[in-house]
Image (tube, rainbow, N blue to C red):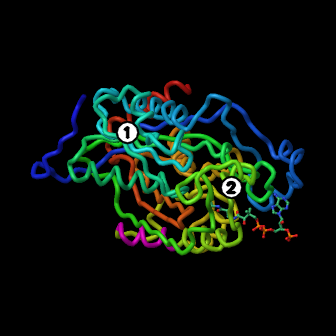
Amino acid sequence: MPAKTNNVSNMTTRNAALTGWGTYLPERVVTNAEIEATVDTTDDWIVRRTGIRERRIAATGETTSSMAIEAGKRALDQAGLSVADLQLIIVATTTPDELCPPVSSRVQYGLGATNAAALVVQTACTGFVTALITAYQFINSGAFPNALVIGAETLSRFVDWEDRSTCILFGDGAGAVVLEATDGACGLHGFVMGSDGSGADEIKIPAGGSVEPATVMSVASEQHTIRMNGRAVFKFATRILAMAGQNAVVAAGLTFDAVDWVIPHQANKRIIESAARSMGIPEDRFVVNIEWYGNTSAASVAIALAEALDSGQIQPYDKLLLVAFGAGLTWAAAVVQPEPVTSSHWHERFESVVLSER
Ligand code: UT7
C-alpha cells in the first residue's frame, strides 16, 4: 500500500507544462430530431436558442469512471508518461458512479495508477477549471511532479427526458490533460475562483443526497433529476463569464488583447456570444464545440481544450483563457500557456503530425 508523504520544507516553486490530452465521447449520437420525437420541441428552436445540434449519450455499461479512464489513458499516452510515475489524479464531475466511494478512486484503480493520490472536485460545470487550477497549485508548490486532470460526466442518467427545458441541453463525455513540472516559461499565469451559494437552488438535483434521501416517492416524482431555472442561470452566466475572464486576465498581468484563445464552458451558444461581446474579443477566437456535444458540464472545457490541441487550432505557446460557471453558483477562470515556446515535446509532435499529413 503506497503512502503519500510530502515534506513541505523540501517544496520549491515549479512551472507546469501541459504535456498530454485526450477525450472520450460515447459513440451514440442523439440528434435534435430524435428529441423532437419525444418532447414538445423542434430542431429549429434548439439550434436558435442554444446552438446545439446533437449530443453524445453513454451506452449501458459506460459510466463516468469508464469514460474518465479512457480519456485519462489517452492523455497519459500523449504525454508519454508512465502510469506508474503518475502522482496525482483529480476528477471533476457532478455525476459520479456512486455518492460513495469517490469516483477518483475507481479511476485511479482502473488506470492502474498505484502510486497516485486521487480526489474529486465537485463544482458542477466549473469543475474542470477548478480542478486544473488545483493541480497547478500542487505542481507549482513542488508537492507533486505531475498530475492527471479529468472532467467526466454521465448527465444523461440525471436528466428528466420529459422536461424539454433541460433534456435538450445535456450530453455525456470526458476530457483529460496531463501536467508535468518544468523549468520552462509556461503554466498558470493567473486565475480566479468564486462561489455564490445564494443561487444554490437555481440548478440542482433535489433528491438522493442527505437532505432528501432516495425514496419511492422521490424517484416517482423525478426528484433525482436536474432542475434548473434556465433564465436565472442565463443571466448569471452572461455576467460572470466576462467578469471572471477579466479578473483572471488582470491577475495574469495581461489584457484581453494578449489572449490568443478563449475556451468557455459550452452551456449555450448565446451565452458565449454575449461573453465575446462583453470582453470585446472576436468570436472566432473562442473555441466552440457545443453544436456536437451539448453541455457536458465538468467535461465541457476539458473536451474543447483537448480537441483544439489535437486539431492544432491551439498552438503550444498560445495564451488560453479557460472560463466556466455552473451550479452552486460557481465560477472559475484561468489564463494558461500549455508549454514554453521552445518545447521539444511540442516540436516533435507537430513535426510528426506535419510529416504524417504529407
Ligand atoms: O451548465 C449549466 C448551466 N446551465 C445553463 O447555462 C443554462 C442557461 N439557460 C439557458 O441556456 C436558456 O435559458 C435555456 C436554453 C434553458 C432556455 O432558453 P430561453 O431562451 O431562456 O427560454 P425561456 O426559458 O425564456 O423560455 C421561452 C419559451 C417558454 O415558453 P413561453 O412560456 O414563452 O410560452 C418555454 O416554455 O420557450 C419555451 N421552451 C421551449 N420551447 C421549445 C423552453 N424549452 C423549450 C424547448 N422547445 N426545448
Residue type, label 2: Gln
Q: SS class of the residue under badge 2?
A: loop
Q: Is residue 211 left or right of residue 20?
A: right
- Residue at (49, 26) in percent of width and height: 355
> Residue 309 appears at what percent x and percent y?
50, 42
Tell me where the magenta segment starts and ends, as one range: 243-252
Check contact, mark 1 vs mark 2: CB within 8 A: no
Dot 1 or dot 2, earlier in sequence: 1
| Residue 308 visible to an observer of this rendering | no
- Classify the position of the C terminus by image quarter: top right
Most foreground residue, 249 or 151: 151
Check residue 250 for magenta coloring. Answer: yes
| Residue 131 visible to an observer of this rendering | yes
Q: Is residue 207 left or right of residue 262?
A: right
Above or below for 99 versus 244: above
Q: Is residue 230 left or right of residue 114?
A: right
Check residue 297 for magenta coloring. Answer: no
> Residue 112 appears at what percent x and percent y?
38, 25
Q: Identify the main secondary structure in magenta.
A: helix
- Residue identifier under label 1: 19
Q: Where ligand 1 lies, by image quadrant? A: bottom right
How far is mark 1 from mark 2, CA to CA? 41 Å
The answer to which image quadrant residue 147 occupies is: top left
Disc assigned to residue 223: 2
Query: Which of label 1 and label 2 is nearer to you?
Result: 2
